Image (cartoon, helix red, strand yellow):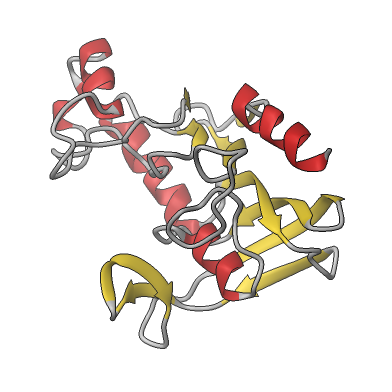
Amino acid sequence: VIDKPPGLTVHPAPGHPSHTLVNAILAHCPDLPGIGDSTRPGIVHRLDKDTSGLILVAKNEAAQAGLAAQMKARTIVKRYLVLVKGKLTPERGAIEAPVGRDPRNRQRMAVVSTGRPSRTSYRVLQQWDKFTLVEATLETGRTHQIRVHFAAIGFPVMGDATYGMRTPHLQRQFVHACYVKFSHPRTGECLELESPLPDDLKQALESLTK
């Protein structure tokens, strides 16, 4: 399990052929090229470039198969700390809306009738007059799901230049993968890991709440 810093792309793509998390993983574990997708060796799920936090990587084929099965069965729990614009109510809820490519801009995702079923549950952790800090749990794993879902209900993610609200207090979207729970693919042991809020998001929270 890697605690990914913000600004690091997960796997090579047009415009990002090197200096990615996959490049770093291959340097550390040279036996990985044959594990799973050749372009994303060992990668079980992904995080956006500017999202920080916990990401799972399989180091052998058995681990890849075991973790992929858990992902398919939706038994892996992934939670995120997210700051949104506005006073979100109720304090607990779920956003259920299909997510797919935005027909007007193929570089973006959107809530569209032809999209894949998607569900994000949340609980409010703290509120101010103009902001809400939530813990969001992904029940599906669509591209940009958290950012698209909160924008769709009128509570855009702070610092998100694509779907949300720009702010001078943030250089990136306020999304941090803070918690993951899964079964060890070999031993079956239940593993729970947490990542504290990074300094840049802590400082942004302090600035925004003054």
Image height check: is 48 above or below 98? above
Residue drawn at the location 67% of the way across and 26% of the way down: 196
Relative to 42, 120 lies left or right: right
Residue 71 left/right relative to 105: right
Tell me if 131 is positioned left or right of 154 in this view: right
Examine the rendering and report whether any part of residue 180 can be seen: no
| Residue 54 or residue 158, whichever sits in front | 158
Q: Position of residue 95 (x, y in %)?
A: 64, 72
**Residue appearing at x 50%, y 37% in the figure:** 171
Task: Judge whether residue 7 can be spotted in this image.
Answer: yes
Compare residues 191 and 196 and report the one nearer the observer.
196
Looking at the figure, which quarter contains the C terminus? top right
Residue 184 percent across, percent down from the top left? 51, 31
**Residue at image point 64% right, 22% down:** 199
- Of residue 112 and residue 22, the one placed in the foreground of this image is 112
> Where residue 125 sits: x, y (%)?
83, 48
Task: Give the x, y percent position of residue 181.
Answer: 61, 38
Question: Left or right of 46: which side holds 160?
Answer: right
Q: Judge whether 115 appears above or below 136 on screen.
A: below
Residue at figure coordinates x 21%, y 23% from the top left:
23
